[in-house]
Image: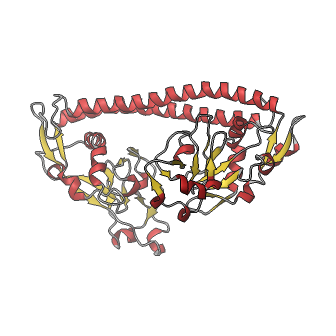
Amino acid sequence: MQNNIMTNLPQGWKMETLGEILSSDKYSIKRGPFGSTLKKSFFVEKGIRIFEQYNPINNDPHWKRYFISHEKFQELEAFKATEGDLLISCSGTLGKIVELPKDTEMGIINQSLLKIRLNNIKILNSYFIYYFNSPIMQEKILESTLGSAIKNIASVKILKQIEIPLPPLKKQERIVGILDESFVKIDESIKILEQNLLNLDELMQSALQKAFNPLKDNAKENYKLPQGWEWKSLGEIGNTSSGGTPLRNKKEYWENGSIKWLKSGELNDGYIDFIEENITEEAIENSSAKIFQKGTLLIAMYGATAGRLGILNLDSATNQAVCAFLHKDNKNIKFLEKFLFYFLFFIRDKIIKDSFGGAQPNISQTYIKNLQIPLPPLKEQEQIAKHLDFIFEKTKALKELYTKELKDYEELKQSLLDKAFKGEL
């Protein structure tokens, strides 16, 4: 992509490296100090502010929380940032940028930032920011990163070699004007779509609230129920079970297997039709994996997917991170999987909140069995589930539509940026 731009520049444009468009200041490009140079023990209640990753990540140059003394600032003056400077996040959340406007309070950058001061006779800050956010530049930044798990911008030396297509200042102003106008309209549309998505969540939550607390009792637990309903623990109305993972180094457990084996990451808050992996009968016999029937309700018990739900649309085994909810042989208590699915969906935030005892959420089978559910007669369960199915499907379809439109707008932004720096606007 970069070479294409270099060989097809519009008339009057030229390629210059980042190093060539920097200000002549000694510290026109500077990485933040090493952690030992700027420790929390140096912080004071009032003094010179410290810029952090939050500023570029949230496009907020004014946010601040830490300060150093004027004496410490004199030692760290090489890391000074002031109005007109650009700050870039360069570890973790990589490649976000913010300009420090005229009213910005001066400060120093921390170790997670890169400061750039441009030669504004050659390039406008606003033009550079748009270019920096373009697919071309972001690709170059990612190509220049070190580390695998956490990306980190490479050395200043490498960054200074990145080439930038540079039109005359008047042309830069025109490009910025077009992009400003276009992005304002796009961002307005994005904001509306994001609000629409929030409204759909509220609509679904309202429907669930009405379904499971029809008398609108304000009690947080064991609220009043309609006649014929009763509070039951999940352990009273059903049994729980979990699966297991056959040994991966045993080929006979995995090769040519015909039994579906579901991982917690495949739970999708709906019906499960596709399961990636299969295991063999031998794997079932020699591990804690067990087969659950089509129609079984599942919930993820721990890790990043904790609380995610699913209903099997085919027979399948599961791994140990999945809890299955099974019917008891009890003619007096009946439950509908879809009714229970919607109730667990309704209280999921509470489940996840209750499950945080360590670094990751962990939902035990004991906890699940002790959960209290407002249980109506089976006929009412069916009616409620049918009503919620209708709302769920409608909101799901709209969510998919709005999400696609959001993606389209983001792609439109990237397309405009790509055209801008090829001189096609």
- Residue 132: percent from the left, percent from the top? 69, 43
* Left or right: 415 as drawn, with respect to 424: left
Q: Quadrant of the C terminus?
A: top right
Between 50 and 98, the one lying in front of the other is: 50
Q: Residue furthest front?
A: 71
Residue drawn 46% across the image and 65% down it: 257
In this picture the colour scheme is secondary structure
- Residue 58: percent from the left, percent from the top? 53, 41
In this view, 33 is above or below 284: above
* Left or right: 165 as drawn, with respect to 89: right
- Corner quadrant of residue 408: top right
Residue 239 visible in the current orientation:
no
- Residue 296: percent from the left, percent from the top? 30, 50
Residue drawn 75% across the image and 34% down it: 420
- Corner quadrant of residue 404: top right
Residue drawn 9% across the image and 31% down it: 227
In this view, 245 is above or below 140: below
* Left or right: 73 as drawn, with respect to 20: left
Between 190 and 207, the one lying in front of the other is: 190
